[in-house]
Image: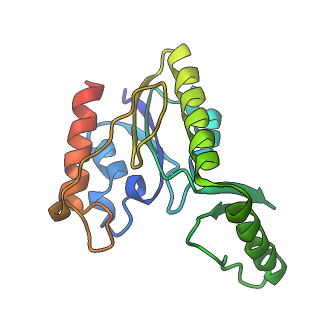
Amino acid sequence: MSKLLYLDGCSYTFGQGLDPSDRLEHRFTQAGYNVINKSRIGKSNLAICLDTYNYADKADVLVLGFTYSSRYYLNFDRRDIDLLVNRYTLDCGESSALEDEYVNLHKSFYTLFDQNHWNNLSDMLIDNTLDSLLLKNKKLFAFSWEARQTKQKLYYPLVSREQRLPDGHLNAVGTKNLFNFIQARLG
């Protein structure tokens, strides 16, 4: 019987720009895991922690790739809304009222709160999430794409330029190396 692995993170964990067969999800599936993959492009640490809270009890193993602290998350009408410091608009199709509100929220969030606020919020969320998982004796591997000041130890992938796509995301070799490192730590 294969183990259930929960995978979460942003576009780096999702595998943006990669063929599906080169993504972490596929590599874990090939390694014998059943995978619940909740990673997505632009996902924030808040959204990662919330989804992990909702799915952790189902998983045998968790792999969490934390992201940049300046990202934020809201849910409106069952729609995930990821706020990114460099995403000034939201493509809502026919819902222009939501687009207008996103623009206002973006201005408010990134004017009212400084980077220290976002860093502290992310560190708290990450520490509390990892503490909760460790108390449940969950097998997990956590890493971050941004330096954190967490109490819990995180892995920080060092990825050379040769292991990246032109946009900075991991290429197939970079993803394979990250997968191999994680697999070795999970045992």
Q: Position of residue 21 (x, y in %)?
A: 28, 59
Horizontal relation, residue 49 to residue 170: left or right: right
Q: Position of residue 163 (x, y in %)?
A: 19, 60
Q: Position of residue 5 (x, y in %)?
A: 43, 35
Q: Position of residue 86 (x, y in %)?
A: 55, 71
Residue 47 is at least partly visible in this image: no
Q: Tell me which residue sits at (55%, 29%) in the image.
A: 127
- Compare residues 187 and 128 and report the one nearer the observer: 128
Q: Tell me which residue sits at (33%, 62%) in the image.
A: 20
Above or below residue 102? Residue 149 is above
Report the number of discs: 0
Q: Quadrant of residue 174?
A: bottom left
Q: Tell me which residue sits at (57%, 30%) in the image.
A: 129
Q: For the N terminus, give its image quadrant.
A: top left
- Compare residues 154 and 9 and report the one nearer the observer: 154
Q: Tell me which residue sits at (28%, 45%) in the image.
A: 157
Horizontal relation, residue 32 to residue 67: left or right: left
